[in-house]
Amino acid sequence: MSSYQLAQLNIANMKYAIDSPEMSDFVVNLERVNKLAEESPGFIWRLQTEEGDATSIRSFGSDILVNISAWEDVKSLHTYVYRTAHTKFMSRRKEWFGKMEDAYTVLWWMQKGNYPTLDEAKKRLECLQAHGPTVEAFTFKKAFSAPDVQVEKDSVEYDDLCPVT
């Protein structure tokens, strides 16, 4: 068993203000989608304020929403993202969020029992944007195993990234 857990960050550039009518379906469904994550196998933790979400955290810019979470492994997160009702919600992202030119999702390994910070997440995303996938900052398309797990290949590729794109 690994002594590491997976951390993930994804950011999204809002087209409209969070309290606008155009964002209402996103906001209304957020609690349900967060609950689905929390009840998913492999879920450990997610960033949230006292309100129960992270919509007021704007560390990446005034129009950028942030999501940070920790999972047991890549497979658990991948299953939640692409094999649950989250996929239907995610398929509507173009209604609420603008296209991002650089990488906006990053994964990395951290010691179990720790939670990713905003500063660390920002550094990992910058690392991915500057160097592409590495053991320090990677993606689903080129995911690396935990540092203490022996595998035959250096990385694992998920061919079925997203059925909604």
Image: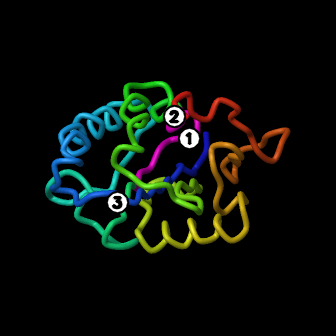
Q: Which mark is residue 15?
A: none
The mark nearer the N terminus, 1 or 3, is 3
Q: Position of residue 27 (x, y in %)?
A: 21, 45
**Residue type for callout 2:** Ser
Q: Residue at x 71, y 57 (%)?
A: 133
Disc 2 vs disc 3: Cβ atoms closer than 8 Å?
A: no
Q: Position of residue 98 (x, y in %)?
A: 43, 55
Question: For the magenta stretch, what is the residue range?
Answer: 68-78
- Quick one: SS at disc 1? loop
Q: From the viewer's perspective, is the residue at label 2 or at label 3 nearer?
A: 3
According to the picture, the residue beneath numbered tag 2 turns out to be 76
**Quadrant showing the C terminus:** top right
Q: Quadrant of residue 58?
A: bottom left
Closer-to-camera residue (12/81): 12
- Quick one: SS at disc 2? helix
Q: Which mark is residue 73?
A: 1
Closer-to-camera residue (116/27): 27
**Quadrant showing the N terminus:** top right
Disc 2 vs disc 1: Cβ atoms closer than 8 Å?
A: yes
Q: Residue at x 45, y 74 (%)?
A: 119
Q: Residues within 10 Å of mark 1 (few under 14, many from 20)?
A: some
Closer-to-camera residue (63/52): 63
According to the picture, the residue beneath numbered tag 3 turns out to be 65
